[in-house]
Amino acid sequence: MTTLVFLPLVLAGSIVAGLLGALTGLGGGVVIVPLLVVAFHVNVHYAIGASLISVIATSSGAAAAYVREGFSNIRIGMFLEIATTLGALFGAYLTTRLSTGIIAIVFGSVLIISAALSVLRRHSVKSSGRPNDLAVRLKLNSSYPTAQGPEEYQVHHIPAGFGMMFGAGTLSGLLGIGSGAFKVLAMDQVMGVPFKVSTTTSNFMIGVTAAASAGIYLRRGFIAPGLAMPVVLGVLAGSAIGTRLLVRAKTSWLRAIFALVIAALGMEMIYGGIAGSF
Amino acid sequence: MAESNVSRTDGFLSKWNDERVERILGTLLQTGVIISGIVVLIGGVLYAVRYGRVPVNYQNFDPERASLRSLKEVGGGALRGDGRAIIQCGLLLLIATPVSRVLFSMIAFALEGDRLYVVLTMIVFVILLYSLIGGVS
């Protein structure tokens, strides 16, 4: 395949990946890596390098839109970024050590879990009881706008949430993904942060987390310019279209279909990893 | 002291400050993405023109193949008009975008008089610098 054939094909694939990522809320990274590895026979290391860059782009690009809504909590985000960036360094270190087969198997498992998380309807843990001392000291409790005016919320289980964020950061650095699904899980389900606040704060954190692995990826030669270029531009365009569609389309059944597609990609990654074909 | 007044986070003033800071940061991030996207696109066109007929193969990982791993190589290549180096420049700008967000948050927390968060933000910033400049090699 020559460059002039390869570039438009990867660009088109990346637009689809960005679209799927935005519609499922999982981000472009979880789709682009299996697509590059399975369909284009790209080495896992190059694929996660290109994906990580696209994750930074979509997170930063969406930030302005999210900020306008006024949900995100920069203190929760900044405090937890200590955990996610440390995790990202650890993950990026692991990914330089592990074989591509093992990375593919871990990736596939994460895809299947993420797909399941995206369709399962969960009830947010409503915070109650007296304020958590640590949350007060860290000024994490805040309020967010609702139709009935600002609603207060209290943050709990901070060490557990911090630990989970380290795990989310490790997955991000290991697999070149944003791992937004896990960040939201830690805030929404463990720490009692309202879902809307969790998703917007998570988006803010994803770019910073990914930047923490990017330096290591760059020096290790994971980021091939000729591959990263169509991936970044395509995923950015795709997620911009996807975000616009989200406003109009009824998405619950779309989510279910795409979750199936992502789970299937996950199986393919695990199979390929075990069979040693990557 | 005026400073201790501002540092109370439960007040209306600091809530408003937080929101304004976030708005500025959001715009900063979006601008960074647009600029780096344009640089990547320019590099991409130059790359496609020069290497269009060359076969591509990313099947085998060879860290030495991506010879654009240091700032010096990237800068020099970009000045010579090498498409790949210009793409890499755009990607570096992209990586710098969230890093600059952390730096600006630190300044904003300092202006609000929130010393605790100046320190917490500084920790994040140092971790980012450690990844970008040295460490784990």
Image: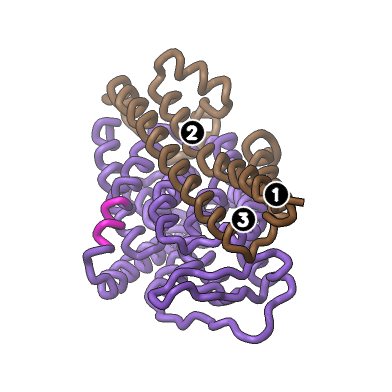
Chain colours: A purple, B brown
Residue type (three-letter) at the residue carrying disc 3: Met
Residue type (three-letter) at the residue carrying disc 1: Val
Residue ranking furthest to the front? B1
Q: Which residue is mark 1?
A: B118
Q: Which disc, if any, is residue A78? A: 3
Q: Is residue A167 visible?
A: no
Residue type (three-letter) at the residue carrying disc 2: Leu
Looking at this view, is B115 or B129 the one in front? Answer: B115
Measure how far apart labels 1 and 3 are at the Cα level. 10 Å
Which residue is rendered at x = 46% and y = 15% of the image?
Answer: B79
Camera-nearest label, 1 or 3? 1
Q: Chain of mark 1?
A: B
| Bounds of the magenta segment | A240-246
Q: Which residue is mark 2?
A: B93
Q: Is residue A243 magenta?
A: yes
Q: Quadrant of residue A229?
A: top left
- What percent of the width, then of the height, locates residue B123? 71, 48
Mark 2 residue element = helix
Q: Chain of mark 3?
A: A
